[in-house]
Amino acid sequence: MSKQKIAIIGGDGIGPEVTKQGVKVLEKLAQISDLEFEFEDFALGADHYLETGELVTDEVKADLEEFDAIYLGAVGDPRVKPGVLEHGILLDLRFSFDQYINLRPIKLLDPKFTPLKDKGPEDIDLMIVRENTEGLYAGVGGFLKEGTKDEVATQQMINTYKGVERVTRYAYEYAQKRDQEKKLTLCDKSNVLTYAHDLWQRVFAEVGQDFADVKQDHMLVDAITMKMVRNPEIFDVVVTCNMFGDIITDLGAEIQGGMGLAVSGNINPEGVSMFEPVHGSAPDIAGENKANPIAALLAAAMMVEVLGHPEEADKIEQAIKLSLAKNQTTLDMGGNLTTDQVGDYICSVLE
Ligand code: NAD
Ligand code: IPM
Ligand code: MN
């Protein structure tokens, strides 16, 4: 089997601590399967920025283009103004590699970790398909009379037919293939965003004509936060814009057991994809070997799956399920293992 070349961007805070566990687990997976990985580290993040003033240069992007996938920890550092690293590294990579799909599964792996009363793994198993390259994230806007009492600040929500069509089509295809109810819910705010989300409504209906076997559903974003808590079982696949996808997936992370378990795939179906935990760099616990690496390990599993090896990916997920069932976890999950020890435990299960 050919070697998979993986670029590692540990990033800031707990980022490198959790990607280190991911690499360890993938190396173990390679030992027990036909898979082969080649890793290369890219030292991007706050330290590199503070030393050189560089975020991601065109040379680095050209190098990354040669990889089969990118595996990212997190970026963000209290020494750097909010947004500089997030925009300059994370969003720049998502946009530059045109990773227009953000796949964020909400799946309860172990019943004891949901805060929802009377809900189990059969109720909490949905997929959020988040648009990942436009919307309020496009970076269009500016200041007028900045710093004065007459200041005007704008940030425009960019919705293109192409952008909405491709993410909607992907979501329908995903719902069609998923072994579930075959239902796609459009989550928007079409009652207020009467231009931007009118486009989403029209495209959703139009693309839906090609998917007669997928049930169409619609929910406003405020209502969906309510329903995800009260009746998560009514969802199969949800498609939504960049901003709402960001917000509802943190809520989703909590109902499936917390940020330590939530995973995110930035997918370009025709190009280089990037896999990461949903959580950030957690400066409050960085450097203490306390971070939960499971989200990063699930991101590694998703990467293996998207690279075409679902059975091998499932081995990682099964090992993680066992660690949860046996409380071989970090403090945030009620366990008493360190970050490294959780990684070692998952490796020992794979062995
Ligand atoms: P955060 O996810 O870093 O942390 C929120 C809370 O969850 C903190 O209390 C933290 O300790 C805890 N937490 C997060 N991940 C954990 C883990 N794996 N194990 C145990 N506990 C964990 O979010 P924040 O505090 O809002 O942001 C911190 C920085 O990270 C900011 O600079 C932000 O912009 C950045 N950020 C980056 C990404 C990314 O790179 N993908 C995502 C979100 C936030
Ligand atoms: C996420 C993060 C990012 C986002 C930030 C850090 C730019 O919150 O991956 O969920 O908003 O997409
Ligand atoms: Mn987020």
Image (cartoon, grey):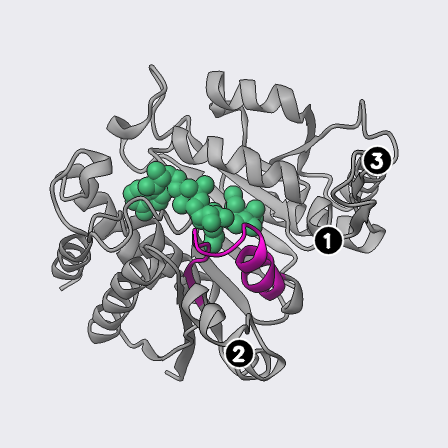
Query: Which label lies toward us, 1 or 3?
Result: 3
Query: Residue shown at 23%/68% (left/top)?
Result: 24
Instruction: From this view, report whether residue 191 is shown above or below residue 309.
Output: above
Instruction: From this view, report whether residue 54 is shown above or below residue 79.
Output: below
Q: The N terminus is located in which quarter?
A: bottom left
Viewer-nearest residue: 123 or 40: 40
Other residues around mark 1 within 10 Å, as few (<14) / some (14–19) / many (≥20) = some
Secondary structure of the residue carrying tag 2 is: helix
Circle 1: residue type: Gly
Res 111 label = none
Image check: 287 left or right of 84? left
Instruction: From this view, report whether residue 339 is shown above or below residue 95.
Output: above
Outermost residue on the right side: it is 195
> Which residue is disc 3 drawn over?
150
Q: Is residue 240 among the parts visible in the rendering?
A: yes
Q: The C terminus is located in which quarter?
A: bottom left
Per the model, the C-alpha gap separating discs 2 and 3 is 44 Å
Query: Magenta includes 138?
Result: no
- What is the magenta range? 71-94
> Which residue is disc 2 drawn over?
64
Circle 2: residue type: Leu
Q: Position of residue 251 (x, y in %)?
A: 48, 30
Q: Earlier in the sequence, mark 2 or mark 3?
A: 2
> Which residue is disc 1 drawn over?
139
